[in-house]
Amino acid sequence: MRSLPDRAPAYPALAATPSFAAEPSTLSSLDDLALLGLLLGRCLSAPMVGATAEALVDRFGSLGDIAAAEVAELGRLPGMGPAAILDLKLLRELSVRLSRTTACARPVLSSWNALTAYARTTLAHLPREQFRTLFLDRRNHLLRDELVADGTVDHAPVYPREIIRRALELSASSLILVHNHPSGDPTPSQADIVVTRQIIDAAKLFGIQVHDHLVLGRQGTASFKQLGLI
């Protein structure tokens, strides 16, 4: 297990303080461990908060990795009962929905940074590979964001015909493909390149454009368009 970086000595005092004692105006000044401790303090006894927060960071890493961790894995840590796990999942879902609201406020192609932020919030920290498709209308507004495949740590089965069938059902004019690499490295694999080409070729038959394929990992985001692969 890796050692934690040095942190301000004020945290032990925070661990003994009820979470409702924190002032909203001070939250931005707290480090990640302190924020996590405040969240856990809603459902854990004060003596358990600090140790549980440190155990989560030690086991999973960043706040994004903790919130995206599988329920079974979270439940293996002492103190992580149903209430604490639910709070973490609520935090993650709120983050995803807030980023989606920003991404959908304007046509997707004119708010690319917001779209990338939404995609990263949704997928970058997941422990298993997930493939999603964003279906856009003729004005490039988001019609639907749908899960196409939920896979393993290094593979998600994708069937191009099913993506095109769904695009036709939604009367989508274009698509953006998105998936994650749990390894952290967003570099497209040869399999990623092959399936993307298959989807593009199938979409062309029906006049549907594939704008991009984003591959997300903890180390960054790879765009097929920027890489010259589309």
Image: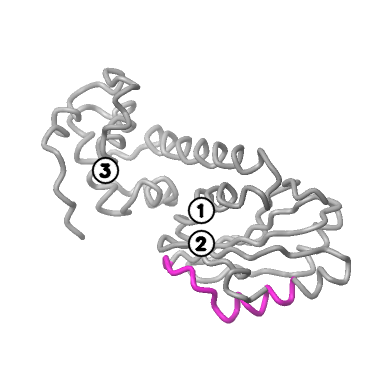
The mark closer to the camera, 3 or 2, is 2
Assess disc 1: are there few (<14), some (14-19) or many (≥20) residues with their C-alpha within 10 Å of its C-alpha.
many
Image quadrant where residue 127 sits: bottom left
Q: Are marks 2 and 1 in contact (CB under 8 Å)?
A: yes
Image quadrant where residue 161 sits: bottom right
Q: CA distance from mark 3 to mark 2?
A: 31 Å
Image quadrant where residue 91 sits: top left
Task: Check residue 120 in the rendering and tell me which mark sits there, or answer none.
Answer: 1
- Residue at the disc numbered 3: 78
User: For numbered disc 3, what is the local secondary structure?
Assistant: loop
Q: Amino acid at mark 2?
A: Leu
Span of residues in magenta: 183-199
22 or 66: nearer the viewer: 22
Which residue corresponds to the image point at 20% horizontal and 59% vertical from the top-left? 2
Q: Position of residue 98 (x, y in %)?
A: 55, 36
Q: Are marks 3 and 2 in contact (CB under 8 Å)?
A: no
Assess disc 2: are there few (<14), some (14-19) or many (≥20) residues with their C-alpha within 10 Å of its C-alpha.
many
Which residue corresponds to the image point at 81% horizontal and 68% vertical from the top-left? 203
Which is nearer the N-term, disc 2 or disc 1? 1
The quadrant of the picture occupied by the C terminus is bottom right
Which is nearer the N-term, disc 3 or disc 1? 3
Looking at the image, residue 97 sits to the left or right of residue 8; the answer is right
Q: CA distance from mark 2 to mark 1?
A: 6 Å
Which residue corresponds to the image point at 66% horizontal and 62% vertical from the top-left? 177
Q: Amino acid at mark 1?
A: Arg
Q: Position of residue 68 (x, y in %)?
A: 44, 49
User: For numbered disc 1, what is the local secondary structure?
Assistant: helix
Looking at the image, residue 213 sits to the left or right of residue 76; the answer is right
- Residue at the disc numbered 2: 216
